[in-house]
Amino acid sequence: MSDTRRRVKVYTLNEDRQWDDRGTGHVSSTFVERLRGISLLVRAESDGSLLLESKISPNTAYQKQQVSFTFLENRRVLYLI
């Protein structure tokens, strides 16, 4: 059976408009009760810690740029490669 997980890098845009590397992990989507909706989850490939948990919202502008996604969450720009 092949591995269907998608490997991603997570970056956030800091106050100085520089990209901060949050880590590399695997992205999935699942219903998160606490957030009351389907969410993107990224777990670090090194130790399984949660790098990103973001509720998918129809009001969020997700932009696909070649092989990456960029979106704004809680005043943070997130960039997934």
Image (spheres, rainbow, N blue to C red):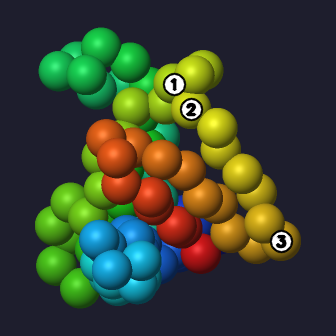
- Label 3 environment density (alpha carbons within 10 Å; few <14, some 14–19, many ≥20): few
Can you give x and y, in whole percent of width and height, for residue 61 in the image?
64, 38
The one nearer the camera, 21 or 13, is 13
Task: Kindly indicate whether the residue at mark 2 contacts the one at mark 1 (C-beta within 8 angstroms).
Answer: yes
The tag earlier along the polypeptide, 2 or 3, is 2
Label 2 residue SS: loop
Q: How far is the residue under mark 2 from the one under mark 3?
A: 19 Å
Nearer the viewer's eye, disc 1 or disc 2? 2
* Snapshot quadrant of residue 1: bottom right
- 73 above or below 47? above
Residue at mark 1 to residue at mark 3: CA–CA distance: 22 Å
Along the horizontal axis of the image, is 6 left or right of 19?
Answer: right
Say which residue label 2 marks.
60
Q: Nearer the viewer, residue 1 or 80?
A: 80
Q: Is residue 79 left or right of residue 15?
A: right
> Type of residue at label 3?
Gln
Q: Which residue type does callout 1 highlight? A: Ser
Q: Is the residue 59 above or below the residue 71 in the image?
A: above
Which residue is at 33% across, 80% downward? Answer: 16
2 and 3 marks in contact (CB < 8 Å): no
- Residue drawn at x 68%, y 69% as measured from the top left: 68
Q: Amino acid at mark 2?
A: Thr
Q: Residues within 10 Å of mark 2 (few under 14, many from 20)?
A: few
Q: Tag 1: Cα neighbours inside 10 Å, few (<14), some, or many (≥20)?
A: few
Q: Residue shown at 78%/66% (left/top)?
A: 65
Q: In the figure, is residue 58 to the left or right of 40?
A: right
Q: Nearer the viewer, residue 30 or 3?
A: 30
